[in-house]
Amino acid sequence: MIHLDVTIMGQAYRLACKEGEEKTLLEAVHYLDSKMCALRDSGKVKGNDRIAVMAALSVAAEFLSMKAPQGPFADASVLEVKQQLAAMNSVLDQALTPQEALF
């Protein structure tokens, strides 16, 4: 097992992977970091937990559309996907707001 020290959105993480998979893991870290930083920098999504969830949803949507062209975003334009993600963000806002009040 190999351990890599990486940074995602300014936060340090120590990740483990199998030998020979370092390059793939580092590419995934870079991709996720760029997605999360773009969301943070847009100012539309606040809070690291929301940024992480929105980035995960975006990556999952990309994956599903490539994996199954007939998937949920197959016929959607970029604008439609953005609108669907914005709707998901709204639902997350409503769900997470009561939890944030506790802190």
Image (spheres, helix red, strand yellow):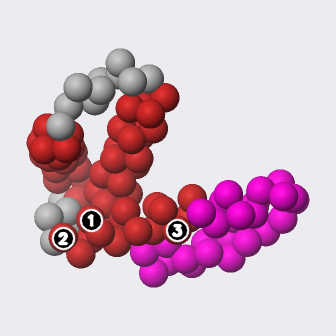
In what quadrant of the picture does the N terminus appear?
bottom right
Q: Which amino acid lies under the numbered mark 1 shown in the image of this protein? A: Leu
User: Is the C-beta separation of discs 3 and 2 under 8 Å?
Assistant: no
Q: Which residues are magenta?
A: 1-27
Q: Which mark is residue 30?
A: 3
Residue lying at the far top of the rendered structure? 70
Q: Residue 14 magenta-drawn? A: yes
Mark 1 or mark 3, whichever is nearer to me: 3
User: Is the C-beta separation of discs 2 and 1 under 8 Å?
Assistant: yes
Q: Which mark is residue 102?
A: none
Q: Secondary structure at mark 1?
A: helix
Q: Residues within 10 Å of mark 2 (few under 14, many from 20)?
A: few
34 lies above or below 49: below
Q: Secondary structure at mark 3?
A: helix
Q: Residue 8 magenta-drawn? A: yes
58 lies above or below 63: below
Among numbered discs 3 and 2, the one appearing first in the sequence: 3
Find residue 40 and report its image quarter: bottom left
Pointer 2 residue: 42
Pointer 1 residue: 39
